Image: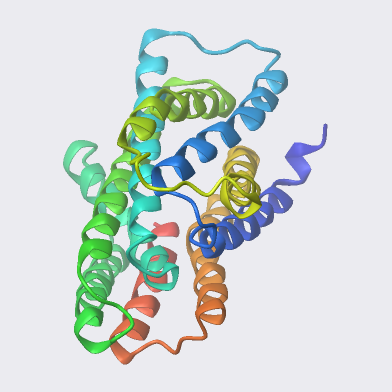
């Protein structure tokens, strides 16, 4: 295989699939909890491909398993909350907001790993707080966005994913191959399926037509493919290019597509928040 020479192609796959996935995740008429179930199932084919690539030699050392499962559970919990958030707020606000998750990673790395934050990193932290303030103000300045449910839920997502990235740092130092980490992420996603089903209100009608579970699967598998491609992009590529493409450009694609779908022009606070969030991620990706 020529994965080593195609790292940029893998990074571009992640950028495009995640950008499209984010924009269309709220389109299907399907319960958020069952959307999670479909997403978890969509991780299985990619996990099987990862096992094939390492010839089914999964890292089963206790420390590697614990850290990798921690990565998976935090990511899966974030996904479950994200799907609920998209029922209460638009993707063009939610995805830029959760893209500032690196601020949590930076803070944890500074406290526990004694990593230093550069002056540029401090600017990134300030921009992250500017973005959060602007998104919270957008409720009062835009009649199309009401209530704070989406803001609270999106905040929980970026906390989960920020902590996840920190734990992933520890996992990558303990696990010899990225495929094993991905497989455990898929396992963790499947483990939480009963929780998602238990949270589902089946007393309400469930759409079982094509624009329900089937359309949801086609959209959610984009996320799994992007995550799988990112494994190889990070393994063989240059972090200074991979990180901005995956973490910053993908939310830009999501935001643009979502704004077109909604035919909505952002308010001034929203626009400042979106630009601040993307700028923050670009800064952190170079830290």
Residue 214 image point, x, y percent:
64, 46
Q: Which of 260 and 47 is in front in this view?
A: 260
Q: Can residue 245 be seen in this view?
A: no
On the picture, is 94 further left or further right than 230? Answer: left
In the rendered image, which quarter contains the C terminus? Answer: bottom left
- Residue 128 lies, with reference to residue 273, above or below; the image says above
Among the 4 quarters of the image, the one containing residue 149: bottom left
Q: Examine the rendering and report whether any part of residue 160 can be seen.
A: yes
- The total number of labels drawn is 0
Q: Nearer the viewer, residue 13 or 4?
A: 13
* Closer-to-camera residue (82/12): 82
| Front position in the image: 169 or 247 | 247
Q: What residue sits 41% from the left and 17% below the top?
A: 64
Name above or below for residue 52 compared with residue 35. Answer: above
Counting from the top left corner in percent of width and height, residue 93 is at 37, 71
Find residue 144 and report its horizontal and vertical position in percent: 33, 82
Considering the image in quadrants, where does the N terminus appear? top right
Report the side of 276 relative to 58 (left or right): left
Quick check: 236 left or right of 141? right
The answer to whether residue 117 is above or below residue 178 is below
Q: Residue at x 56, y 62 (%)?
A: 24
Q: Quadrant of residue 38?
A: top right
In the image, 3: left or right of 286?
right
């Amino acid at each position: 295989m020529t994965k080593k020479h195609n790292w940029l192609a893998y990074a571009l796959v992640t950028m495009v699939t995640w950008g499209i996935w984010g924009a269309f995740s709220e389109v299907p008429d399907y319960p958020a909890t069952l959307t999670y179930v479909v997403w978890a199932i969509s991780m299985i084919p990619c996990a099987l491909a990862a096992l094939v690539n390492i010839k089914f030699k999964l890292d089963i050392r206790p420390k590697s398993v614990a850290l990798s499962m921690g990565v998976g559970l935090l990511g899966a919990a974030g996904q479950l909350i994200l799907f609920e958030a998209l029922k209460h707020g638009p993707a063009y606000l939610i995805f830029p907001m959760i893209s500032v998750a690196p601020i949590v990673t930076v803070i944890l790395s500074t406290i526990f790993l004694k990593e230093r934050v550069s002056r540029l990193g401090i600017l990134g932290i300030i921009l992250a707080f500017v973005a959060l303030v602007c998104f919270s103000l957008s409720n009062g300045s835009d009649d199309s966005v009401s209530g704070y449910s989406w803001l609270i839920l999106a905040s929980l997502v970026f906390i989960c994913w920020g902590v996840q990235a920190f734990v992933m740092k520890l996992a990558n130092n303990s696990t010899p191959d990225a495929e094993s980490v991905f497989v455990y992420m898929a396992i963790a996603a499947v483990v939480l399926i009963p929780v998602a089903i238990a949270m589902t209100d089946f007393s309400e009608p469930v759409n079982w037509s094509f624009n329900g579970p089937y359309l949801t699967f086609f959209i959610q598998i984009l996320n799994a493919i992007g995550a799988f491609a990112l494994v190889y992009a990070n393994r063989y590529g240059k972090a200074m290019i991979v990180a901005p493409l995956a973490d910053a450009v993908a939310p830009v694609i999501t935001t643009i597509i979502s704004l077109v779908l909604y035919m909505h022009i952002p308010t001034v606070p929203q626009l400042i928040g979106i630009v601040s969030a993307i700028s923050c991620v670009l800064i952190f990706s170079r830290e």
